[in-house]
Image (cartoon, rainbow, N blue to C red):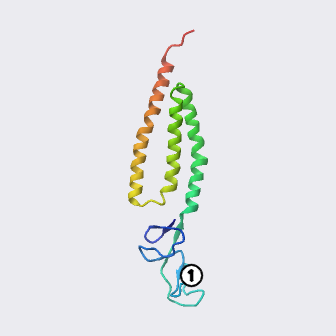
């Protein structure tokens, strides 16, 4: 995906012209279609002075890959640590549910990182709403587990 710097619209990789603002993405083209640098004043192939309006563009494939790596490298170990701590506080019956919940959250984060640049405003709005609901639902088992652990610690231990 390529993002047009003029209007902010996303286009498939390899697109040369923005279909919304009619600017060329990252290059200037002369009447004959020769590509030139974005800051060129004349065509570097034929010397024509009639060049298209060029805007900066951003190829999102490397950005998406980098964001995915950051999520995996930085957030996954922290989340595993929290999961291990919560799992040690609760009983054996709750651990599988916590593991499933954790796997679901991690896959949702990865899907969001990959899909966010591709989605339009409506898709992003729906994804944001889904995340709000997800966090409300995801917090309930952790609150329940924490309450069970507090109750377990509060009970007197027999000798």
Identify which residue is drawn at 54% across, 90% down: 48
Which residue was labeled with disc 1?
A: 35
| Picture quarter with the C terminus | top right
Q: Is residue 43 left or right of residue 119?
A: right
Figure label count? 1
State whether residue 117 is above or below residue 74: below
The kind of secondary structure element at disc 1 is strand
Judge left or right: residue 119 versus residue 38.
left
What residue is drawn where x is 48% and y is 60%? 118
Q: Is residue 72 above or below residue 62?
A: above
Tell me residue 35's x, y (percent): 56, 81
Residue extending furthest top? 159
* x then y, percent, for residue 10: 46, 66
What residue sits 45% from the left and 26% below the top?
147
Q: Position of residue 41 (x, y in %)?
A: 54, 85
Residue 112 vs 19, above or below: the answer is above
User: Residue 30 vs residue 128: left or right?
Assistant: right
**Image x and y of residue 52, in percent:** 49, 82
Q: Residue at x 53, y 13 (%)?
A: 157
Q: Nearer the viewer, residue 66 or 11?
A: 11
29 shown above or below 98? below
* Label 1 CA crowd tier, 10 Å (few <14, some 14–19, many 20+): some
């Amino acid at each position: 995906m390529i993002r047009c710097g003029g209007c902010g619209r996303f286009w498939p990789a390899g697109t040369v012209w923005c279909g919304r603002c009619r600017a060329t993405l990252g290059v200037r083209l002369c009447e004959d279609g020769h590509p030139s640098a974005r800051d060129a004043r004349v065509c570097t192939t034929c010397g024509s002075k009639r060049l298209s309006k060029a805007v900066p563009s951003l190829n999102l494939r490397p950005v998406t890959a980098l964001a995915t790596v950051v999520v995996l490298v930085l957030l996954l170990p922290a989340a595993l640590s929290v999961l291990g701590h919560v799992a040690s506080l609760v009983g054996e019956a709750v651990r599988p549910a916590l593991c499933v919940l954790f796997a679901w959250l991690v896959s949702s984060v990865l899907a969001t990182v990959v899909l966010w640049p591709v989605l339009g405003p409506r898709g992003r709005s729906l994804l944001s709403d889904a995340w709000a609901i997800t966090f409300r639902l995801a917090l309930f088992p952790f609150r329940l587990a924490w309450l069970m652990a507090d109750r377990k610690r509060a009970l007197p231990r027999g000798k």
